[in-house]
Image (cartoon, rainbow, N blue to C red):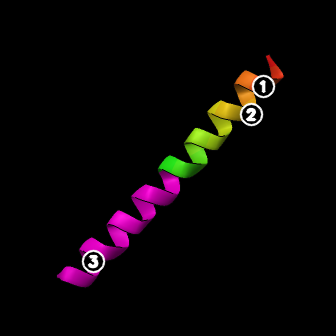
Amino acid sequence: MSMISKTSRKNRVKLAATFGLLVFIGHECV
């Protein structure tokens, strides 16, 4: 159970980082 939570949290952080990067690039382009 803890392993699933760990992976979920890791994926969430990865997703947030990717989203933040996309937003940052989007703002830079504009």
Label pair 2/1, CB-CB below 8 angstroms: yes
- Magenta region, residue range: 1-15
Q: CA distance from mark 1 to mark 3?
A: 36 Å
Query: What residue is pinned by disc 2?
Result: 25
Q: Is residue 14 above or below residue 2?
A: above
Query: Relative to 18, does residue 2 appear above or below in the rendering?
Result: below
- Give the residue at mark 1: 28
The picture quadrant where one finds residue 1 is bottom left
Residue 6, how many percent across, how many down? 30, 75
Kindly identify the amino acid type of the residue bearing the numbered disc 2.
Answer: Ile
Residue 17 horizontal/vertical position (percent):
55, 50
The amino acid sitting under disc 3 is Ile
Do callouts 2 and 3 mark residues in contact (Cβ within 8 Å)?
no
Q: Main secondary structure of the magenta part?
A: helix
Give the spatial CA distance, label 2 vs label 1.
5 Å
Determine which residue is flagged by label 3: 4
Give whichever of discs 2 and 3 has the lower sequence position. 3
Q: Secondary structure at mark 3?
A: helix
The nearer-to-camera label among 1 and 3 is 1
Query: CA–CA distance between discs 2 and 3?
Result: 31 Å
Residue in the image at 36% along x and 74% along y:
7
Q: Residue at x 82, y 23 (%)?
A: 29
Q: Residue at x 57, y 40 (%)?
A: 20
If the image is split into quadrants, where does the C terminus sit?
Answer: top right
Tell me the quarter of the picture where residue 12 sits.
bottom left
